[in-house]
Amino acid sequence: MKDKAIKIACIGAGNVGATAAQYCLELELGNVVLCDIVEGLPQGKALDMTQAGPIRGYGSLCTGTNDYADIAGADLVIVTAGLPRKPGMTRLDLLEKNGMIISGICEAIKTQAPDSTVIIVTNPLDVMAWLAYQKLGFPKNRVLGMAGCLDSARMSAFIAMELNVSMKNINTMVLGSHGDTMVPLPSYTTVSGVPITELMTPDRLEALIARTRDGGGEIVRLLKTGSAYYAPAAGAVRMAQAILRNEQQLLPCAALLEGEYGLSDVFVGVPCILGQNGIERIQPLKLTDDEQTALEASAAEVREGIEGLRSLGVL
Ligand code: A3D
């Protein structure tokens, strides 16, 4: 039992970061420090969220800061700081810009919160999680990336909408990297225990998988400026909850692989048991040959990104 209140640092007070802070407060997972480089932004949002407490019925506090020193002693850090890819920007440009941001933030986490567990959300997700792991020097169980929770939730939502059933008892599992090469697993998809293959035709299932793959893009096209943030923040906070409450919950997360699923030295989405030690263990699953090939292709894409970081001298 800890003798002090749980402290959560959300680095990046933009759409995903502030929403993650709000979900943490609503769940009373701990007190939240919201940190951003823009003066006044985290302070204003934190004050606003604290003032919602008496109405929403939570007692956790939120403070805003531009000073990394204020994340000192955090138990858990959610990193959402970064730039989105803008028109005219290449993948390599984004890698360089977000790579520099993540590197700087990891330096601060390393000195200020050396015992924390770190959840990366910044894109390109799996590559940034790999970079954070390198820069932090933390044990591999304390560095995770959030993508699988979001991609699985999107697939569950599409299935619920298609079948007109409750979203509550739908189980999906999406592995691989966050992007076009994600690996949804129909064989592990059920509705109240009923295999999805008994509830819809292969064509319809394929269409929902394609929509899941394009889940982020669909929202970007609708919003026109900015990208999704409610569900991404929910994914990060689901992971935070499993860790801070020692739930031993099986969730798909980007994790460092060292031989699991036949892959090494790469971050990619796999099923993880999350508890007080962060990743308690990676759960092996039986994959079909096609699924295994798809996971390997996904890992190859992440490796390309890692090589990109090396060529830019960010690693
Ligand atoms: P946005 O609303 O622009 O917020 C980003 C915030 O980061 C801004 O307030 C910046 O001021 C801040 N920032 C930049 N540099 C620093 C720094 N060094 N220290 C502290 N704060 C800084 O973006 P968003 O919240 O919509 O998205 C944030 C990131 O999450 C982006 O990289 C997105 O691509 C990514 N994202 C990932 C997913 C996944 O599923 C993996 C989903 C949605 C968004």
Image (tube, rainbow, N blue to C red):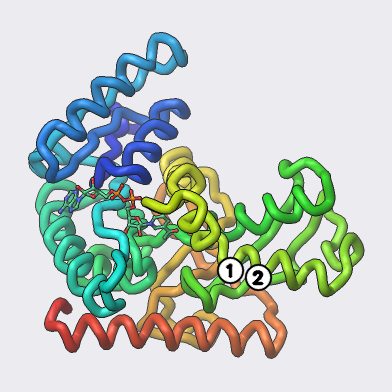
User: Residue lying furthest top in this view?
Assistant: 54
Residue 60 at x, y = what percent?
Answer: 34, 22
| Image vertical order of residue 245 relative to residue 99, above or below | above
Identify which residue is drawn at 32% across, 81% down. Answer: 305
Q: Is residue 72 left or right of residue 89?
A: left
Question: What kind of residue is marked 2?
Answer: Ala
Which residue is more in the foreground, 211 or 264?
A: 211
Label 1 to label 2: alpha-carbon separation: 5 Å
Identify which residue is drawn at 43% across, 77% down. Answer: 257
Packing grade of label 2 (10 A; few <14, some 14-19, many >=20) is some
Which residue is more in the foreground, 265 or 207?
A: 207
| Image vertical order of residue 41 relative to residue 110, above or below | above
Q: Is residue 66 left or right of residue 281?
A: left
Q: Which residue is mark 1?
A: 213
Which quarter of the rendered picture does the C terminus lie within?
bottom left
State whether residue 137 appears in this view: no
Residue 74 at x, y = what percent?
Answer: 23, 41
Which residue is more in the foreground, 95 or 148?
A: 95
Looking at the rendered structure, which numbered label has been put on residue 210?
2
Query: At numbered mark 1, what does the secondary structure look like: helix, strand or loop?
Result: helix
State whether residue 171 appears in this view: yes
| Image vertical order of residue 160 relative to residue 133, above or below | above
Identify which residue is drawn at 17% across, 52% down. Answer: 109
Identify which residue is drawn at 32% across, 14% down. Answer: 51
The reply to whether dot 1 and dot 2 touch (C-beta < 8 Å) is yes
